[in-house]
Amino acid sequence: IQFGEGEEAKVCLDIMQKTGAHIELSLAKDQGLSIMVTGKLDSVMKARKEIVARLQTQASATVLIPKEHHRFVIGKNGEKLQELELKTATKIAIPRSDDPNANIRITGTKDGIEKARHEIQLISAEQDKRAVERLSFEKAFHPFIAGAYNQLVQEVSQETGARISIPPPSVPKDEIVITGEKEAVAMAIARIRAIYEEKKRKTTTISVEVKKSQHKYIVGPKGNTLQEILENTGVSVEMPPLDSGSETIILRGEPDKLGPALTQVYAKAKSVIVVEVIAPAWLHRFIIGKKGQNISRITQQLPKVQSLSILFFSLQMARMDYAEINIDHRFHRHLIGKNGANINRVKEQYKVSVRIPQDSERCGLVRIEGDPQGVQLARKELMDMAQRMENERTKDLIIEHKFHRTIIGQKGEKIKEVRDKFPEVIIIFPDQQQKSDIVQLRGPKNEVEKCVKFLQKLIAELVESSFSVSVPIHKQFHKNIIGKGGANIKKIREETNTKIDLPTENSNSEMIVITGKKSSCEAARDRILAIQNELANLKEAEVSIPAKLHNSLIGSKGSLVRSVMEECGGVHIHFPAEGSGLDKVTIRGPAEEVERARRQLLQLAEEKQVNNFSVALQAKPEYHKFLIGKGGANIRRVRDRTGARIIFPSPDEPEQEHITIMGKEEAVWLAQKELETLIKNLDDVIEDSMVVDPRHHRHFVCRRGQVLRELAEEYGGVAVSFPRTGTQSDNITLKGPRECVDAAKKRIQEIVQDLESQVNVEVLIPQRYHRAVMGPKGCKIQQITREHDVLIKFPDRDECAAQEPASPENGDTDLIPRKCDIIIVTGQAEKCELACAALLALVPVTIDVEVSYDLHRYIIGQKGAGIRKMMEDYEVNIWVPQPEQQSDIIKITGQVASVERAKQGLLERVKELQAEQEDRALRSYKVTLSVDPKYHPKIIGRKGAVISQIRKDYDVNVQFPDKGEEQQDVIVISGYERNANEARAAIEQLVAALQDMVSEDIRLDRRVHARIIGARGKAIRKLMEEFKVDIRFPQPGSEDPSKVTVTGLPENVDNAIDHLLNLEEEYMLSVTETETMASYMKPPSKTMGTGGNDEDNKALAKGFVVRDAPWNAQDMGSKSHVPSTISAFSMSP
C-alpha cells in the first residue's frame, strides 16, 4: 500500500496520544510503509484497530444470524463485542432489538472481516444447540410439579440436564420456563406434562373456612408448614392473599388424601392460641423492657408458651406502683444533673423509672414508676432535692471573659479546687462562643456568699497580675536580653515573676511586652533597660507636653511620632497611657538624637497649639526613598527651608502613594510646591550610560543583584543594566528620572572607587580550625563581615587536611603555609586589619587540665549530661580520655576567654566532687548487730514502718540478712560513725523490749473472727493499739482454724485475751440467733430434700403449673378463656 508519509505520521501521532501505545513508521524502498506498535497488550490492540481503520483500505460485509443470538455476540455490558472488535481489528454494527433487520454489518480489512464473520457464526452455532421453551400451566398445579420443598423439579432437572424455572407462589404467573440443550428440554417437557395431566385427572378440591388470624400458623415460617403438609399427604393447600379479607382455604389433592390433609390444616391452625391480658398502658413499656429485652427473654426461654409467660410477667407487674409529684420546671435540669448524673443515681438506687417533662412543655409533673417501696423512697428524695433548691440562692458574678480560662485552669484543675472547697456551690461558666462575662453561682446562701468572696479575691489578684507594659528596645540588643540559651530572659522572668514576650526575629517591631503585677513589670522593665543602657551609650530624657496634644502628636496610626523617631536616628518616644492625665513624654536613645527629638517634639507641640494645617499629595512609592534621601537628608533640607513636617506612609498602611505635609499653612504650601517640583522632575524619565571596568561588574550583579536592587530602592526606581557576561563591554545603561539617574551614577562611581581602593589580605589559619572560626551556619563570619564591612573568602576544602602531620597546639602557624590554610579578607586596608585580628581571635586554643581519673565519670555525668552542660555553658569542647587509658589529663578547646572560664568551672566541679568523696567515706562506717531472726519482723514493723523511722531519725542504712545467707542473725548498720552507733543502741533497746514479751494461744470460734477483725482490719488494729499487743489469726485452710496467737508484755497479753473472750461470748449470742432464724426461713424445697417423696420434690422443683388452660381444651375452635384455677405456684429462691 502506498502512503504519503506526512499525513500518516500525523494520524499515528493522534493514535499514540489516544491509546498510550508507541508507534514507529519506516518507509521502504518500494514506498511501502511499515508500522511497529509497542506497549501494553490492551493499548497495542486498540492502536492496531485504529491504524487499520484509519490507514488501510476499508471493506464491509454482512452476516445473518437469528435475532435471539445477537445478545450473545454483544455479551455482558458489551464486553464480548469489544473483545471481538479488538481481536479482528474491525467495526461490528449490530441492529437494535426493536429493528426488524437481523443483519450484522462488519467493517474493516478483508482478513479482519473474515475472522469476525467466522467468530460470529461460531457463537450462533453454539446457541443453536440450546433451546428455550415456555409452558403455561394453571398456577394451582405448580406445587405438584415442583414437589415438596422443590424436590421433584430438582430431580427432573438433574435427570434431564435442563434448567426449570417455576415462578414463586407470590408471583401471579402461570408460565414455566425450561432452558438447555434441545434434547434435554424435550425430555423435561415430557416429564412435566405427564405430572400435570396426571394431577389434573386425579385431583379434586375442598374449601374450608379458617379465621384469618390463624392463617399464618398454617403457612408457617417461609411457607414450611404448607410444604410439610404437601410432603406428608400429597395435598396442596392454597391460601388467600394476606391483603384480602377472604378466610377460605382450598385443599387440592386426591380424594382419599384430602381428609388427613384437612386434619393437619386444622391442627396447625389451632396449634397456637392468643390470650389477652389486661394491663395499664403505663406498664406496657416495663413488660417490653429496654429495647425489647424482657419480651425477647420470655420468648427465647419459652418459645412455644408465649401467653403463659406474659401472664406470669403481668402478675409480677401487679407488684408495681407509680407516683406523681409537682416540682417547679425551673428545677428540672438540676434534678437531672450534669449528663443525667443525679436522676440516673436515683433510678439505679431505687430501681425505678422517672419521667421528667421536656423544658418546652413548661410542666412541673414528674412521674415515678416501679416497686412500691422504691417509688416512695425516690419520691421522698426528689421532694427533698426540690426543697433544697427552693432554699438555694443564685447569684451572677461579673468576671471579664479573658480571665475565664485562667480561673478554670488547664483541664479544669483550678476550678476543681474551687469546687472542692465549696462542694455545695454549683459554678456555671458561659460558653466560649457567647463571650459573656456572667458566671452563675448556685447553692446554699451562706456557701454562695463565701464562694463569691473567694472568687472576687482571686479576680483581684488576676487583675493585679495582668498589668502590661511595652518597652521599646533596639532590635540589635534583643539577643543580649535573651542571653545564651535564654538564660538572661529566664532569670528576669523568674526573679520578677512576670511574663515577657519578645517580637519574632523577622518582625520589624522593637517592643518587648511585659505582663504581671505593676511593681513586678516596672522592675522587669528597669532591668531590661539597664541591659540596653549598659550595651549602648543611651540617654533618657523627659519632656513636658500637655496631655490634650498627645493624640495629635502621635498622629494617625502613630505616623507623626514615627516620622520623628526615624528622623532622629531611631530614638524611642513613649507617651503616657491615654486618660492618665500625665504630661511627661519619655525619649530614649543616643544623647545627640534624644536632644534633636526633644526640640522637634516641643516645636510640633507649639505648632499644634498655634496653628495646625495639613495637605496630602501623591507620589509613586518607589520615589519615596529618593525624596527622603540618605539618612533623611533631602527631606530635612525641605523642612529646614519651609518649616513644615513631611510624613511618609509606613509599609503596612494601605495608601502607599499618600505623603502628608503638616505645619503652618504658609509653610505647608511652600513644602508642597517644592515636593511637587521634585516629583515632576522624577516623572521626567531619561536614559543615560556610563563606563565601569568589567572586573567590577560582578560586585553589582552578584547575590542576585542585591546592589542593583538597593540602588533602585534608594534612587526612585532607576533601572541599571550591565552587559552580558562574556561580551567584554564596559558600558552600562541607566534609565529613570533625571535626578535619580544622576544620583545613581554618582553612587556607582563611589562604589567603583571604593572597590579600586580595596586590598586583599591573607590570614593563615590551619584548615582544621576553619569550622570553629565560621561558627554555626557561619554566624561568626557573618558578624565580622557586617561589623568591618569586608568580604571573607575561605579556601576550598583540601584532602591534605586529612593527612596533616601532628597538629600544632594553640593555633601555632610556624609550619609551611598551605593553600587550604589561607583565608582571604577583601576590603579597605584598615578594616581588613581589624577583621584579620577578629578572625585570629576566633582560632581555638587547647589547654590540659589535670583531674584525677576517679572523678572523670562524675564529671561526664549520666549519659554525658554533665560534660554536655559544661560545653554549652562555656562554649568550648571538652575531651575526656577513654577509660582504658586511665589518664588524668582532660583537654579543653575553644577561644582563649572561654577556655579560661571553662578551666575555672572544671576545677570548681573537681572541688565539689572531692568534698562529696570525703563525705561518702565518712558515711561508709559500718557496725553489725546480732539479733535473733524471730525479732526481725518486729524490728521492720508493719510495711517497714519501724525500720523506716529508725533510718530517718538516725540518717543510716539498715541491712537485714537475705534468706539464703548463712548468718541469719546479723544486721548491718552503715552511716556516719555517731549515727550508726546511736541507731544500734535504738535497735538493741527495741530487742530488749521484745525479749520481755510472751506469746499465748487461745481458741476463738472461727465464726466470730470476721467481726473481731472488722472491715479491712480496722477493729483489730484498734484493739492491738489499745492493749499494745500483736494478735495473729489463722490463715484460710489452717489445721486449727480457731487458734489465735496474742503476743506482747505478759500483763497486756492477759488483758487482751480477757477482752477477746468477752467479745467472743457477746458475738456468739448474735451468731446463734441468726442461724436459728435462717433455719426457719429456708424454703420447703430445701427442707424436704432428704425426707420427702422424690416425686413430690420433683413436682415442686418444676416451679408452677397452670391447669385447665385453653391449650389443654379439646374444642380448639371455641373462644379462648382466661385460666380459672392456679393450682400450684412456688418459686425456688
Image (spheres, rainbow, N blue to C red):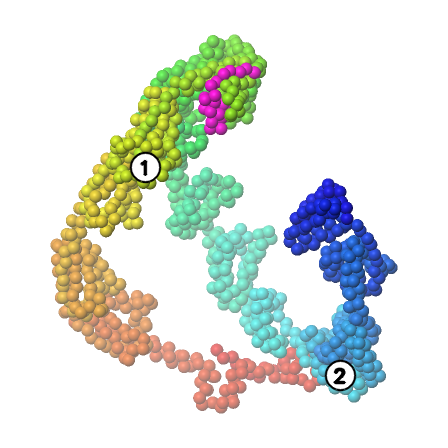
**Which residue occupies the foreground of this view, 16 or 685?**
16
Q: Position of residue 644 (x, y in %)?
A: 49, 12
The numbered mark at residue 768 is 1
Q: Residue at x 57, y 70 (%)?
A: 294
| Magenta stretch, residue numbers | 687-709
Distance between mark 1 and mark 2 Cα atoms:
108 Å
Magenta span contains residue 425: no
Q: Residue furthest front?
A: 29
Q: Quadrant of residue 244?
A: bottom right
Element marked by disc 1: helix
The numbered mark at residue 234 is 2
The numbered mark at residue 804 is none
Q: Position of residue 1090 (x, y in %)?
A: 44, 88
Q: Residue furthest right?
A: 100
Magenta-drawn stretch, dominant element (helix, strand or loop)? helix
Query: Mark 1: which amino acid?
Result: Arg
